[in-house]
Image (cartoon, rainbow, N blue to C red):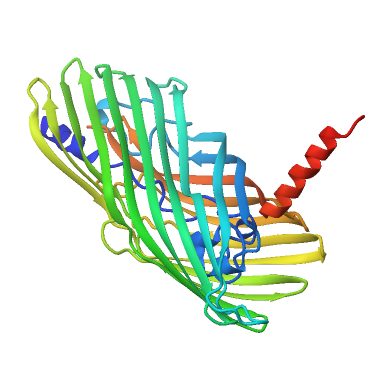
Amino acid sequence: MKRSLAMCALVLAAPLARAQGNYRSAALGGRSALMGDTGIALGTDGAAPFLNPATVVRVEATLALSVTFVSLDLLHASNWYVPGPVDPIYGSAPVSGADISRVSGNAIPSTFCLFTGLPRIVDKKDSRAGTEKFATCFGTTEIQQFDWTGQGYQPMPGTGTTAQSSSVRMSWQRFVVAPTYAVDITDSFALGASIQGTFTNFGRSASVGAITSAAGLPTTSSSYEFGASGSDFGLSALLGATYTLGHLTIGASIQSPDLSIYGHGNVSNYVQLTSSTAQAATTYLGQGGFHAREPTRMSLGVGWDWPRGSVELDGQLALADGDALELSTQGAQFTLPSTTGTPTSLLLHTRYQPTLNASIGAEFYVRRSLSLLTGFATDFSAVDNLSPTSLAPAQVNRLLLSFGVGTHGDTGTLIVGAQAYYGWGSAFAPNVYANPPVETPTSVRTFGVLFVLAGATNLKALANAVSDLRKDIGRPK
């Protein structure tokens, strides 16, 4: 048992992964998000530097802000407290009613962009050729959160009893700073490039323990404790192009795999099993390099716009080139009854599978100042599978449906809407009824709604608004 616990301490450091490998876990822009996360061909908001930098030349505003100001999420996990087989040492303790359901709400920032027109390369009358634009954008491009803290499980007693305490928390966030340049080469052809500085941060902790007794068997205490954190800074490049022929626009972009500049992570793990006849415990403590790399991604979009609206269809292929996530630690392993740590190196890494996602969106103008937006998208998980040595804590696929309303005027644009999703898949849950305790995949389903508020304006409109406000304040009552 001691040997198996020693191996388990290394394996159970696994669940500190790149969330669920979902590239659309945060809504980008306002118009783009509510049109099904499209924008490769006809992007005109703060999502442009993250989808296709060539579309930046289409943006008329000088300031664009999008915020998913609140989200409501419902998660149901089957057999969360008992995700796997029960070892005979626990007897026939009841394990019914082990499902969980969780409702949560979060405030999630999205994107903020400043767009600046540059002097034209050439000055051709009645031509867009030579038009240049520069954008500075900040955006949360991926975000995942799960919090199940301070919970307990005590099923109705039968031939045995068990009481379990459970606290599990994990978070994943990827924040990007993207200076972007775009230029109209001709009236029909535009090029753009974005250099993206990416900061990735994750945290995960789990503390689960149980006391179990069954007729004719000794009372058993088992626990599994795990904690990990990591951060990584990397650089990548995004290149894009658009070609317009009448009402038809074709857009394409390719993102390079990012180069990890610096990353650091920590791991601690404790597995324990105690009864009147046996006692075993293993602890691992380590720290070292943590790298969270994005793969090569290629996108293609086709859009059709006319005076009454626009329609766009996009596809995105993410390759599984190299290790997407890696944690290499140096530490010490302690195994009961010894109090002397054994130097131990631990390398954990995860490859992601190639992932193909599609999206379609439309915007229709009811009148010049009012438009309706809708869209649909897939968000399939890039996680290959959940194995004992996998870094990924979950594999969840999602379907997205969005809808919204936009108002348009001389001072700018305001868009309000929502993005609803349904997800299905599996996630790791600690099984303290195994011998030794292990992480076991269990089935999960998720439902959620992101409420999106977005606006775009220009500096002249802001200056006029400030001037009018000053006049109103100074005007005698």
Residue under the point 55% across and 79% down: 122
Residue under the point 54% across and 62% down: 48
Q: Quadrant of the N terminus?
A: top left
Q: Residue furthest top?
A: 276
Decide: is 306 above or below 358.
below
Residue under the point 34% across and 22% down: 210
**Residue 302 location, x and y as percent?**
58, 76
Decide: is 309 above or below 50.
below
Q: Is residue 128 left or right of residue 191?
A: right
Residue 206 location, quadrant: top left
Q: Residue furthest right?
A: 477
**Residue 284 location, x and y as percent?**
18, 31
Residue under the point 31% across and 39% down: 230
Decide: is 14 above or below 50.
above
The front one of 339 and 320 is 320
**Residue 315 location, x and y as percent?**
51, 70
The front one of 334 and 27 is 27
Q: For residue 19, say whether it is visible.
A: yes
Question: How many numbered circles does the render carry?
Answer: 0
Q: For residue 449, say whether it is visible.
A: no
Residue 333 location, quadrant: top left
Q: Is residue 50 left or right of residue 285?
A: right
The front one of 319 and 59 is 59
The front one of 49 and 135 is 135
Q: Quadrant of the C terminus?
A: top right
Q: Residue furthest bottom?
A: 245
**Residue 253 location, x and y as percent?**
46, 70
